[in-house]
Image (tube, rainbow, N blue to C red):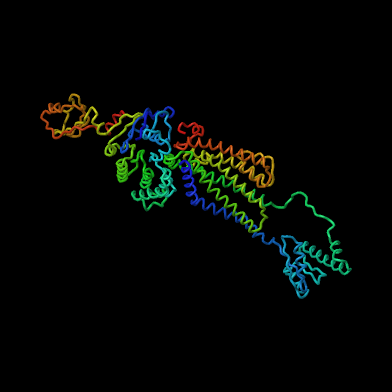
Amino acid sequence: MLAISNLYKTYGDVIALDGCTFAVEPGQLLGFLGPNGAGKTTAMRAIFNLIKPDRGSVTWRGEPIDPQIRRSFGYMPEQRGLYPKMRVKDQLVFLGRLHGMERRMANTQAALWLERLGLAERAGDRLEELSHGNQQRVQLAAAVVHDPELLVLDEPFSGLDPIGVGAMTEILSEYAARGTCVVFSSHQLDLVEDLCEDVVVINEGKVALDGAVRDLRNATDHRYLEIETSNASPDWLRGIPDTEFLSADGPTVRLKVPTDFDFAEVLRNTAGTTIERFSFLPPTLSEIFREAVGQ
Amino acid sequence: MMRQAVLLVARREFIERGRSKAFLISTAFTLVLIAAIVVVPTLIGGDDATTWTLGSVGVIDGDMVSDIDALSGLDVTVVGASFDTVGAAEAALEDGDVDLVVVAGKEILTVEHTSQTLIALTTFTLESRARLDRMRELGLSESEISELNSPTYTTRTIGDVSVGPSANELIAVMGTVLLFISIITYGQWVLTGVVEEKQSRVIEVVLGAIEPRHLLAGKVLGIGGLALIQLIALLGEGFILVSAFDLVDLPATSLGAAGVIVLWFILGFALYATAYAAAGSLVDRMEDAQNAAFPLTLVLMAGYFIASFSFDTDNPILRAASLFPLFSPMAMPLRQARGDATPVEIIFAVAFMVAAIWFVIRLAGRIYTGAALRTGGKVKAREAWNSPDR
C-alpha cells in the first residue's frame, strides 16, 4: 500500500502541498483529480523522490521508500520524453534494467510490450522516427516494462486519440485487476468516472474529497431533478420551496433539490400540465469536483 | 545495485555514442589525419633519402664503394656502377646517371652539381688506400701501419644539442594536442548529453528509477571510456606508423611518455567532464548549452594555450601551470613526456589534481542534482546549489 501522509511543500511564496494525505491500496485504480496547480504533479514527484517535501512522509507497505523499492515502481511523468535517437527496443530494455530487471527478462518483456502495442516492426527504429501517437505508446511501455508494483501516471490520457485512450484504459484496468496499485491524474472526469471506483480530489495542496465515486455522489445533500412536461413553457416550476431552477431546454427542466425532496411538491403545482417523464439523479463526478474545488 | 545503475548508464552512453555517426566519422577522420601527418612528409621527402652512384672505368672496386658508403652516414646510400670506357662514363655523368667517376683509381671526374661531400669522401678514401699501399711497399709491418693510422685526436660532443625533435618531444607535443582535443570534444559530449536529457524530458523517467549522482557518474564514465579508447587507438596508430616509417628512433621511454598522456587524459577528463555536466544541467535547451559552458571552455583553452606556447622549451609559466589543477592536464604531460618535470613536481601535480577532482565532483554533483529536474529556462548555479530538492 502506498501512503502519502501530511505532505507539505512550498516554492517561495507558492504553497504546492498543504498537508496532502491519501493512500492507494493494491488492486485499486485511483483517479487523482484537481484543478491545474492543485499540487498533483508535486505529490506524484514526491513518491519518486524527485522533490523533497518540507514535511510529511511517503511510505510503501508502512516503510519509507528507499531506492531499491522505488525501482519497482513505474512512472509516466506529465512531461513525456525518452531518448530521441535511441532505438525503441534498446530504450525499453535500458529502462527495464534501470528498474532492476535481468537483461534476458528485460529483452523478453520489451519485445512482448512492443508486440502488444503493435510496434514490433518498429523495434529497431529510433524513437524520433515514430509518430507522436506511437511515441506515446512507447512511453507507456517504458512505465510498465518492469511490471511495477505501483504505477503512477501523470495525465496519461492527455494527447491520446480515442484508440489510444481505449488501449490505455485497458492496460490500467488490467494492472489494477492483478493487484498493482495504480494512481493516475486526469482532467477528463467522465473518463475517470467510467474507469475508477475511487478518486482523490485535491485543491490548493489539500485533499478536498477522498472516496468511492458512488459514495461521494450519494453522500451529497442534493439531487438533480429532471422533468419533461407537455407544456413548452415550464415557468410554473420556478419558485417551488427548497429547489433551485437550473435550466430549461424546451419542455425539459432541470432543478437542484435536497436529497429528501418530496416529489409531491411538484405535483401540487402542475396546474393541468402533464408530466411526461422525470428522474432523480445524483450529481456527476464533474459536478462534485467543481463543488469540491469551489468553482 | 548502485554500481549496476552507474554501469548501465555508462554502457548505454558507450554503445549509443560509440555507434553514432559523429563518433565513427570523427574517429576515422582523425586516424586518417594522423596517418597523413606522419606518412605524407616521408613520401614527399622521399628524394631526400640520397643515393650517390659512384662510377668506375673498369671493374668497380666493391671495397671502395662500401668504404665510402660507411663514411657517408646513415642518410646516404652509395652504389657503384662500372663502365667500359672513359667516354661511356663521361656520358653517364653528364646524363646524371652517376654522380662521380673514378678513372683507374687515379683520376676523379665530376660535374658541377656533384656533392662536395662525395668528392671529399672519395678523395679521402682513394688517398687512404694509396697511403696504405705506400706503407706496405716501404715494408712496414701491419702493427706499425695500424699504429700510424690510429687517430691522434678524440671527438667530444658538448651539450645535448640535437637537431630536430626527439621521439619523446614529438610524443609530448602530439600527445598534448590529442589530449586537449579529446577533453574538449568529449567534455562537450557530456555537456550536450545532459542538456539533451533535460530537453527531451527523459531525465524525469530516468531519475524516477535511479539517483542523479549515478546518472552523472555513468555518463562521465561511458563517454570517458569511449574517448579513452579512441585516444589510445590514435596514440597506437602514431607509434606503429612512426616505427614503420623509421621517422625517429623510439626509445623504450616513449611508451612511458604515451602512458603519461593517457594518465593525464583520465585526470583531466574526470575534472572537466564533471564540470561540463554541471554546466549542462543549468539549461534545458541546446542553444543555451555553449553559453552555460563558456567559462569552462575558456579555462580549458587557456590551459592549452599556455602549453602550446611552450611546445619548444620549458619555462616558469608552464612550470606553474603544470602544478595548477585546471591547467595541469595540458601542461604537465608536456613537461613529463619531455623529461622536464621532477618527480616531486609530478607527485604534487597529481595530488593537487586528485584533490581538485574530488572537489569538483562534489560541487558539480550537487549542482547537477539540484538542477537536473528544473525545466523552463536557465537555472542559476547558486539556486541549484541551494535547491531544497537535492
Could you tell me residue B27's position as x and y percent? 54, 52
The answer to whether residue A30 of the structure is visible from this angle is: yes
Residue B148 position (above or below residue B320): below
Classify residue B237 as left or right of residue A225: right
Between A109 and B390, the one lying in front of the other is A109
Q: Position of residue B159 (x, y in %)?
A: 76, 49
**Image x and y of residue A287, in percent:** 27, 32
Q: Quadrant of residue A6?
A: top left
Q: Is residue B177 left or right of residue A164?
A: right
Residue drawn at x 47%, y 32% is B387
Report the residue that reaches farthest toward the right: B138
Residue B43, image quadrant: bottom right
Task: Give the residue displayed 60% in from the left and 39% down from the top.
Answer: B353
Look at the image and tell me in which quarter the N terminus of chain B lies: top left
The extreme bottom residue here reads B84
Residue B234 position within the rendered picture, expressed as x and y whole percent measured from the top left: 58, 52
Residue pictured at 60% horizontal, 52% vertical = B235
